[in-house]
Amino acid sequence: MSRIHIWRVKLSEARKSLRIGNIKYVSVNVDKAPNNSDIQSMSKSAGMLGKRHHSGNPINGNRPLKGVDKNVGSTSDGWVEDDDFVVAVPKMVVPKLEKQKLVEKKIKEEINIGVEYTHKIRTRSPPKSLHEALQKLSAEQKECVSQMGFGKMLSFTVDGIPGQLGQYVVDNLDTDKMCIKLERGSIDITKEVIHQLVGVPNGGVWMNNVDDKKADKTISKLWRSNYPRDEVSPGDIAERLEAHKVADWMFRVDFLQLFSSIMIDCQKNGKCKMCLLPYFTEEREISELDWCSLIYKTIAECKDDWVRDDRKCYFAGPLTILTMLYVDCTTCSGLSVERKRIALADWDMKRLKQRQHVEMQCGGFGNGQIRSYLLNM
């Protein structure tokens, strides 16, 4: 066996022992024959490189080994080609987007929520501003709210709706049959059920949901004159209620506009609608208006203009009411919540997130038992 063949065998064995991380080129100069100390040095370097690789990043590899000559030596006899001693290893780069997808996939597998309800519903009417405003009302204002027929709302503790839970409820809302479909039946939605849940007046003067362009502009201009912008948001109303503690006629208009925008519906951009303002005159008895029929009608129409898979299309309907109907009318084996006479006082964002988590861990939403609706008041 020739000396050049022996060198190639030994170098091949040393090269196999390498655990290559992030190295572009490894070259060996064969102008002179390697002695035993050279072979031992190469083996030692190979072992060190293997340790660096395993202790480093398993995806992106490591930096090139320092001290390795990247220039290939030339031969004088023509027996050995440069390419025989060059190993090219491309750098492995995982895009950030791919890493993010891998992490999201792992999370979805861990919580076992299924493909259908990985979406989180996007709403323009979160209940937080209403909850905060109610907590800061004066005693006089609370008395005014009760006289209008909204006394139960003073116990309102819902300060948020979890996205996946809300997505499930709206997805399974059947606006033709007016029910929320579940695995073991359905929750019927009626005006009486809405009255039991929210406590607003049921029956009386029907409020036609007049288009904003056809509404009386006089009261609209008078109300909007209290705000710096033409379009008023629920947050703007909540700030005004905190600053003004008088229970006058304008307070009633502010409160009713805030309630309507959060609990019934709002514009697609999250601003308050003006169509109900003509009913809030100083002479009007608010308790004589049929609020339950208005909510019932809004539920029946809330999915007409909503596109589920369009992330730019926000749900502007009564998400809080629909979610409260679901959690109060169904059981959850892994979570015990004492049922009170006022369902709106049973839940807040923390408990609703717990409910969402437990249901997803137990096989998904809608698998609980359906129970009779609320207690008679």
Image (spheres, helix red, strand yellow):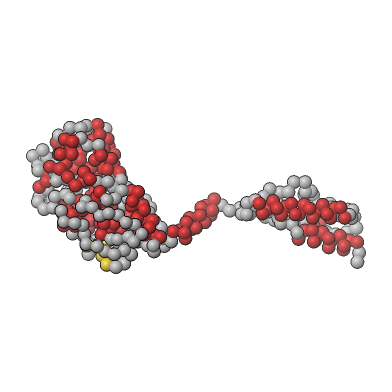
**Residue 58 vs residue 330, the one in the foreground:** 330
Evaluate whether residue 367 shows in this view: yes
Disc tally is: 0
Q: Position of residue 195 (x, y in %)?
A: 17, 53
Q: Is residue 323 left or right of residue 44?
A: left
Question: What residue lies at 74% left-to-right and 57% top-to-bottom?
Answer: 18
Side of 245 relative to 21 (left or right): left
Q: Residue 210 appears at what percent x and percent y?
A: 17, 48
Q: Which corner quadrant of the image does residue 13 belong to?
A: bottom right
**Residue ID at (25%, 39%):** 135
Give the x, y percent position of residue 279: 13, 44
- Residue 332 vs residue 41, the one in the foreground: 332
Residue that extends furthest to the left in the rendered view of this protein: 283
Query: Quarter-wise, where is residue 297 in the image?
Result: bottom left
Q: Is residue 366 left or right of residue 279?
A: right
Residue under the image location 30 percent in, 54 percent down: 337
In this view of the protein, can residue 304 be seen by the observer? Answer: no
Q: Residue at x 11, y 40 (%)?
A: 281
Quarter of the rendering occupied by the N terminus = bottom right
Residue that lies at the very extreme toward the bottom in this rendered image: 184
Residue 151: name its quadrant.
top left
Q: Position of residue 156 (x, y in %)?
A: 24, 46
Residue in front for this viewpoint, 145 or 295: 145
